[in-house]
């Protein structure tokens, strides 16, 4: 699907991928006001019920909406009261990410199961002249509607324009979800930002430790 850009444009329903490392440059929709599609280094979108284990991406990723160093979008699907979610476990990205909406160092837009995943590199928030201001950008995830468990980021976020909304050191926008046992490297912490740019529910758990997790040394 041309709307989804990555080493895999779409990882389909019930697919299982294990122990795969890829490297390269991914360029998706990045020069037009188009809120469809997604761009990720490893996968543009990971469909519900798909699984990716112990897989990694190194390189650069450029897009407009739902942009992530590893995956642009991780999905869920609800049918007859049953929820089916994609799963990403023990995966990592080391990427230079450039995005405008719903963009993160590891994943842009998430409603799947993500656990024990790491992100390193950079995120550059880019304003495209004549289009909307950037929104929902985070060092690990742009926006997440499901829990993140034991995830880590060392991604440094920078921006070419001030006035962007919902910027978070770890997550740009947290919907009805929790963050458990997560950590962020001290050099990736912007003191002007919260760990979560916008938290929709006051009772959501935000459990993030500042530590140099690449050598396991806690801060403070």
Image (cartoon, rainbow, N blue to C red):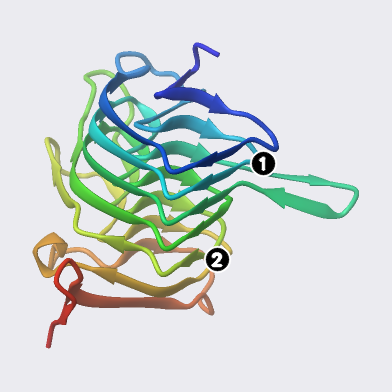
Secondary element at image label 1: loop
Query: In the rendering, at what x and y percent does residue 27 appear?
Result: 30, 18
**Residue at figure coordinates x 41%, y 69% from the top left:** 150
Considering the image in quadrants, where does the N terminus appear? Answer: top right
Residue 18 vs 133, above or below: the answer is below
**Residue, disc 2:** 177
Residue at 67 percent across and 41 percent down: it is 48
6 vs 105, left or right, is right
Residue 5 at what x, y percent from top left? Answer: 42, 21
Which circle's residue, 2 or 1, is located before the other in the chain? 1
- Of 84 and 67, the residue lying toward us: 84
Q: Residue at x 31, y 48 (%)?
A: 165
Question: Residue placed farthest to the front in the image?
Answer: 19
Question: Between 16 and 159, which is closer to the camera in this rendering?
Answer: 16
Foreground residue among 200 and 43 = 43
Instruction: Give the quarter of the figure containing the C terminus.
Output: bottom left
Point 54% across, 79% down: residue: 203
Residue 182 picture location, percent across and down? 36, 71
One can see residue 122 in this view: yes
Residue 133's x, y, as percent?
29, 34
- Residue 126 circle label: none
Relative to 1, does residue 146 appear above or below in the rendering?
Answer: below
Q: Quadrant of residue 162?
A: top left
Seen in the picture, residue 128 relative to 173 is either above or below; the reply is above
Q: Residues within 10 Å of mark 2 (few under 14, many from 20)?
A: some
Residue 104 lies, with reference to residue 47, above or below; the image says: below
The residue indicated by pointer 1 is 48
């Amino acid at each position: 699907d041309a709307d989804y850009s990555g080493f895999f444009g779409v990882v389909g329903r019930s697919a299982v991928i294990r122990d795969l490392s890829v490297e390269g440059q991914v360029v998706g929709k990045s020069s037009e006001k188009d809120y469809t599609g997604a761009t990720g280094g490893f996968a543009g979108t990971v469909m519900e019920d798909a699984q990716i284990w112990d897989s990694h991406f190194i390189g650069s990723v450029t897009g407009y909406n739902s942009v992530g160093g590893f995956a642009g979008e991780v999905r869920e699907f609800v049918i007859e009261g049953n929820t089916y979610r994609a799963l990403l476990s023990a995966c990592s990205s080391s990427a230079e990410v450039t995005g405008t909406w719903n963009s993160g160092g590891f994943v842009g837009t998430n409603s799947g199961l993500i656990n024990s995943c790491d992100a390193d590199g950079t995120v550059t928030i880019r304003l495209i002249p004549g289009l909307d201001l950037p929104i929902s950008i985070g060092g690990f995830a742009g926006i997440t509607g499901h829990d993140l468990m034991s995830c880590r980021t060392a991604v440094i976020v920078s921006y070419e324009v001030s006035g962007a909304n919902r910027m978070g050191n770890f997550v740009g926008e947290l919907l009805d979800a929790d963050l458990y046992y997560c950590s962020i490297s001290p050099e990736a912490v912007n003191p002007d930002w919260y760990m979560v740019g916008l938290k929709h529910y006051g009772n959501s758990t935000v459990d993030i430790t500042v530590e140099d997790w690449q050598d396991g040394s806690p801060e403070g």
